[in-house]
Image: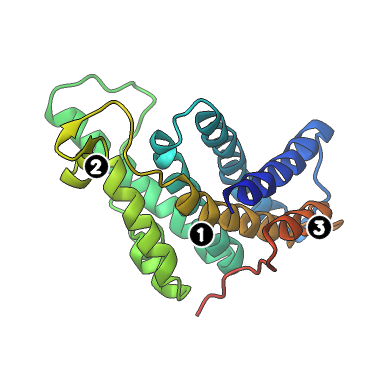
């Protein structure tokens, strides 16, 4: 099914490129802030897809696993922000500020110079922050156990694990090529996540500019893609 998945991804990325080339999105006024907040993530998803497909064409599909993992994570967080709205945006801001506070303190602790215009936020928390900082929690909220298992499988191959090292060893002999091709396993779930991200963005637009591409992608995949449901 990898050919169908690759084709579906290309269709959806092409639709993204068309919107960027047009230089405008038709968005209701009440949704402009939300679209602005998630558009960068959607851009990351689509541009990362290009990188993954380029890696595949170059014979580096196994090494593209970090890209597929990032696409999966960004897609579900994007879904959550679209579903929750203002509270989700506040959560993302709070998590970012806390990360910045910790980085600032770490820089000061090691005596690293901090630019004058970089300030230290006060400790910031939000009751929903686990949905952003803990992917397992977010997957549980969507009943997406299978997606989380795939995510964990991807993680095994992007961190320096024994399993990741074994990917280049066959019958006890090291080699320069991965001995198991996991591209097909991971590109299928990636295609679904990219389609779900497109559905989420499309739900915010006045003209549903992505509907045609989403339908074409579903035909290639042979399944109807629906957005995950927040429990």
Residue 217 in sight from this viewpoint: yes
Looking at the rendered image, the quarter that the N terminus falls into is bottom right
Q: Secondary structure at mark 3?
A: helix
Spot occupied by residue 13 in the image (x, y as percentages of width and height)? 69, 41
Residue labelled with disc 2: 164
Q: Which residue corresponds to the image point at 64% horizontal and 45% vertical from the top-left?
A: 39
| Contact? badges 2 and 1 (CB < 8 Å) | no
The answer to which of 84 and 201 lies nearer the viewer is 201
Q: Quadrant of residue 217?
A: bottom right
Q: Quadrant of residue 104?
A: top left
Spot occupied by residue 203 in the image (x, y as percentages of width and height)? 73, 62
The answer to which of 90 and 195 lies nearer the viewer is 195
Residue labelled with disc 3: 211
Indicate which disc, 2 or 1, sits on the residue closer to the N terminus.
1
Q: Which residue corresponds to the image point at 41% horizontal and 41% vertical from the top-left?
A: 65
Q: Which residue corresponds to the image point at 61% horizontal and 62% vertical from the top-left?
A: 82
Of badges 3 and 2, the one in the foreground is 2
Give the alpha-carbon distance from disc 3 to disc 2, as whole Å: 39 Å
Give the alpha-carbon distance from disc 2 to disc 1, as whole Å: 25 Å
Spot occupied by residue 172 in the image (x, y as percentages of width and height)? 14, 37
Q: Which residue corresponds to the image point at 61% horizontal and 46% vertical from the top-left?
A: 42
Indicate which disc, 3 or 2, sits on the residue closer to the N terminus.
2
Give the alpha-carbon distance from disc 1 to disc 3, as whole Å: 19 Å
Indicate which disc, 1 or 3, sits on the residue closer to the N terminus.
1
């Amino acid at each position: 099914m990898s050919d169908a998945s690759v084709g579906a991804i290309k269709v959806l990325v092409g639709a993204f490129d068309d919107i960027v080339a047009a230089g405008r999105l038709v968005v209701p006024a009440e949704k402009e802030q939300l679209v602005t907040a998630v558009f960068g993530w959607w851009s990351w998803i689509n541009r990362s897809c290009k990188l993954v497909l380029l890696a595949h064409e170059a014979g580096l599909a196994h090494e593209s696993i970090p890209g597929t993992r990032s696409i999966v994570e960004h897609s579900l967080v994007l879904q959550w922000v679209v579903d929750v709205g203002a509270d989700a945006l506040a959560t993302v801001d709070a998590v970012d500020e806390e990360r910045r506070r910790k980085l600032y303190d770490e820089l000061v602790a090691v005596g690293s110079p901090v630019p004058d215009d970089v300030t230290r936020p006060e400790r910031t928390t939000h009751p929903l922050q686990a949905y952003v900082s803990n992917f397992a929690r977010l997957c549980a909220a969507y009943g997406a156990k299978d997606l989380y298992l795939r995510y964990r499988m991807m993680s095994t191959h992007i961190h320096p694990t024994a399993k990741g090292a074994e990917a280049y060893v066959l019958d006890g002999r090291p080699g320069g090529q991965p001995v198991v091709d996991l591209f097909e396993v991971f590109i299928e779930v990636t295609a679904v996540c990219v389609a779900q991200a497109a559905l989420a963005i499309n739900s915010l637009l006045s003209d549903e500019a992505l509907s045609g591409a989403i339908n074409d992608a579903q035909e290639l995949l042979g399944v109807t893609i629906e957005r995950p449901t927040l429990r």
